[in-house]
Amino acid sequence: MKSTRKGLRDGDLEKDNYERLLCADCGESLKTENSPDEVFSVRICAECGREWKELR
């Protein structure tokens, strides 16, 4: 699982006009899954199921 920063650099993720993260393959907005025990949240593409870590 890559970080969102690395995904943006590699071209796997894009940002729209409102700074929301989008999956570059599907064009879908990423959903957030938070775990209270972790320092990061997981960003998931609902269409293709790919995941990225995002530090909070």
Image (tube, helix red, strand yellow):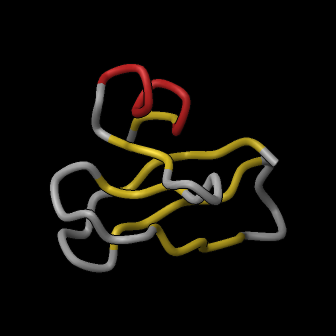
* Vertical arrangement, residue 26 with respect to residue 8, above or below: below
**In this orientation, which residue lies closer to the viewer: 16 or 51?**
16
* Vertical arrangement, residue 46 with respect to residue 49, above or below: below
**In this orientation, which residue lies closer to the viewer: 19 or 42?**
19
Residue appearing at x 49%, y 47% in the figure: 15
| Location of residue 56 in the rendering, given as x and y in whole percent from the top left corner | 82, 48
* Quadrant position of residue 48: bottom left
Labels in figure, total: 0
**In this orientation, which residue lies closer to the viewer: 55 or 18?**
18
Residue appearing at x 46%, y 24% in the figure: 6
| Location of residue 8 in the rendering, given as x and y in whole percent from the top left corner | 44, 31
| Location of residue 26 in the rendering, given as x and y in whole percent from the top left corner | 18, 64
44 horizontally vs 47: left or right: right
**In this orientation, which residue lies closer to the viewer: 24 or 49?**
24
Residue appearing at x 38%, y 41% in the figure: 1
Name of the residue lying farthest toward the front? 17
* Vertical arrangement, residue 10 with respect to residue 13, above or below: above
| Location of residue 18 in the rendering, given as x and y in whole percent from the top left corner | 64, 59
* Vertical arrangement, residue 43 with respect to residue 32, above or below: above
